Image (cartoon, grey):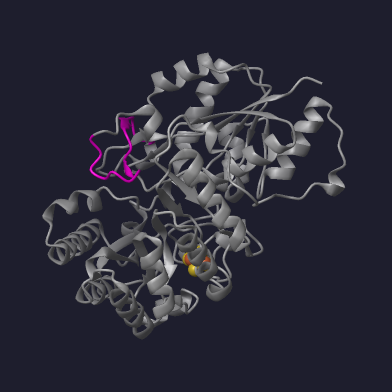
């Protein structure tokens, strides 16, 4: 039987702003690994792979993160009133079209999707794919497809759409298309074991790692539970083997944890993982672009983080207001946050190397609550990261936003864009939004004593 060829695509981001924080399409890579193990031949085009599509030699950061190239495009009509330039981030259209001309004609195309309001990027990706391969079955999956299946079906018109974990589902679908029989009773729904197929990337400076799927918490604004019904952690030895093998095979020195709950079950998960990295003798840099559970950072974990090479430490606080902390699963309070910072400092981290996420724009959240939270974090000497709220269907905050009239059942996902949603609420307007960002930036600059960093913050990922 001849080997079936699949073309896997990580599509463009379409937004006002985007910044590469060691990002890789992990869901798609897990699918690639799974299908490869079952005999499919995989080719990957990651349109967000900056090392492939753009000159990164002038990147301000030398660790793998950096600005995506932006191709300015007309704003979708729904966003016309917002005074920011809109664009496609990643490869240029010409690069994408040229790359498609060079791939082996695939038997099927798999496209992933991430944040729902980036869907115009997916749509444009699919439009170009259809021109190059009009008769090839196209399967759409990923986060947007899972959260907004009807919208995705209507807007993208994929041949097939898959929601939730895609590994086994997509294999069954492909097998059916190609007349392949196998015993599915012995096939797991997915497999998190082992290293991902990083050889699919022509160049690598950093990789993303997931040591778990899901989260044991239920924050009212978060969709993790909707996408991952169960919280599953990998075996620490398996994670250590993945990191050491990628280090040796691909000469990678930067590893970014993309877990939602990296520090859950601390003593039987992250503690053995970090001990294993230290014992292996490899010298690497660890980054956590997602917020870490500050409550878990006792002095032992802080010391292990420092010794194992943590360089980017971002903590979740969200707000200092107790009522918001409650909706944030009570995962933190101000006293435990202060203690975590003290533990990190004693372990060797400078306070101004630690960052903390605060949320802005929750339904009902006031400007004063946000300003107080910024002051509280900055008073600790820590860097503030303002993360703008975006409502996600199926969450408690979506229902709240709906009750307040900010969204409806048929709201275009574009209107949930985190750059614009916060000032569509009654409590904040655009000037408040800009003011709060300015306050955070100036407090950060004072803590860093480095004015130049402001640029990255204005152009940050949220
Ligand atoms: S802790 Fe983080 S990942 Fe978990 S539910 Fe809350 S926001 Fe989501």
Instruction: Establish if 187 lies above or below 395.
Output: above
User: Which residue is at the far top?
Assistant: 101
Q: Between residue 202 and residue 459, name the one nearer to us.
A: 202
Identified at 69% across, 22% down, the residue is 107
In the shown orientation, is residue 382 left or right of residue 107?
Answer: left
In the shown orientation, is residue 206 left or right of residue 230?
Answer: left
Would you identify the image quadrant in which residue 19 lies?
top left
Q: Do we see residue 1 in this rendering?
A: yes
Identified at 73% across, 43% down, the residue is 169
Quick check: is 67 in the magenta stretch?
yes
Identified at 36% across, 78% down, the residue is 340
Quick check: is 238 in the magenta stretch?
no
Instruction: Establish if 360 lies above or below 195.
Output: below
Q: Between residue 368 and residue 341, name the one nearer to us.
A: 341
Q: Between residue 446 and residue 223, name the one nearer to us.
A: 446
Location of the N terminus (image quadrant): top right
Q: Do we see residue 412 in this rendering?
A: no
In the shown orientation, is residue 239 left or right of residue 203?
Answer: right
Question: Magenta segment, which residues?
Answer: 58-76
Instruction: Establish if 187 lies above or below 202.
Output: below
Q: Position of residue 410 (x, y in %)?
A: 54, 49
Would you identify the image quadrant in which residue 43 lies?
top right
């Amino acid at each position: 039987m001849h080997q079936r060829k699949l073309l896997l695509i990580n599509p463009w981001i379409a937004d006002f702003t985007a910044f590469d924080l060691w990002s890789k399409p992990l869901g798609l890579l897990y699918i690639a690994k799974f299908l490869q193990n079952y005999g499919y031949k995989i080719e990957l085009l990651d349109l967000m792979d900056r090392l492939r599509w753009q000159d990164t030699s002038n990147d301000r950061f030398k660790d793998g993160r950096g600005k995506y190239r932006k191709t300015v495009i007309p704003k979708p009509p729904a966003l016309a009133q917002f005074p920011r330039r809109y664009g496609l981030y990643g490869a240029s259209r010409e690069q994408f079209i040229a790359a498609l001309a060079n791939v082996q004609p695939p038997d099927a195309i798999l496209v992933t999707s991430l944040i729902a309001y980036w869907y115009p990027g997916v749509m444009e990706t699919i439009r170009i794919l259809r021109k190059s391969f009009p008769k090839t079955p196209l399967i759409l999956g990923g986060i947007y497809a899972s959260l907004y299946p009807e919208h995705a079906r209507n807007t993208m018109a994929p041949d097939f759409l898959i929601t939730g974990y895609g590994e086994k589902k997509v294999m069954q679908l492909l097998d059916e298309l190609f007349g392949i029989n196998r015993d599915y009773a012995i096939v797991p729904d997915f497999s998190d074991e082992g290293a991902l197929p990083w050889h699919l990337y022509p160049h690598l400076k950093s990789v993303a790692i997931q040591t778990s799927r899901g989260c044991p918490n239920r924050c009212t604004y978060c969709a993790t539970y909707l996408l991952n019904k169960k919280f599953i952690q990998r075996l620490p030895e398996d994670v250590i083997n993945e990191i050491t093998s990628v280090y040796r095979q691909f000469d990678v020195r930067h590893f970014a944890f993309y877990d939602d709950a990296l520090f859950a079950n601390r003593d039987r998960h992250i503690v053995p993982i970090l001990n294993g990295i230290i014992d292996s003798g490899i010298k690497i840099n660890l980054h956590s672009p997602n917020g870490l559970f500050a409550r878990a950072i006792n002095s032992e974990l802080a010391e292990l983080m420092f010794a194992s090479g943590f360089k980017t430490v971002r903590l979740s606080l969200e707000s200092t207001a107790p009522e918001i902390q409650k909706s944030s699963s009570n995962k933190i309070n101000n006293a435990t946050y202060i203690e975590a910072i003290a533990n990190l400092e004693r372990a060797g981290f400078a306070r101004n190397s630690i960052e903390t996420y605060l949320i802005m724009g929750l339904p009902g959240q006031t400007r004063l609550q946000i300003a107080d939270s910024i002051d509280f974090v900055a008073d600790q000497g820590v860097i503030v990261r303002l993360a703008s709220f975006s409502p996600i269907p199926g969450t408690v905050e979506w229902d709240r936003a709906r009750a307040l009239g900010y969204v409806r059942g048929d709201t275009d996902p574009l209107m949930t864009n985190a750059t614009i949603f916060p000032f569509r609420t009654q409590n904040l307007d655009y000037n408040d939004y800009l003011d709060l960002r300015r306050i955070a930036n100036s407090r950060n600059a004072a803590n860093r004593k480095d004015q130049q960093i402001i640029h990255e913050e204005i152009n940050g990922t949220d």
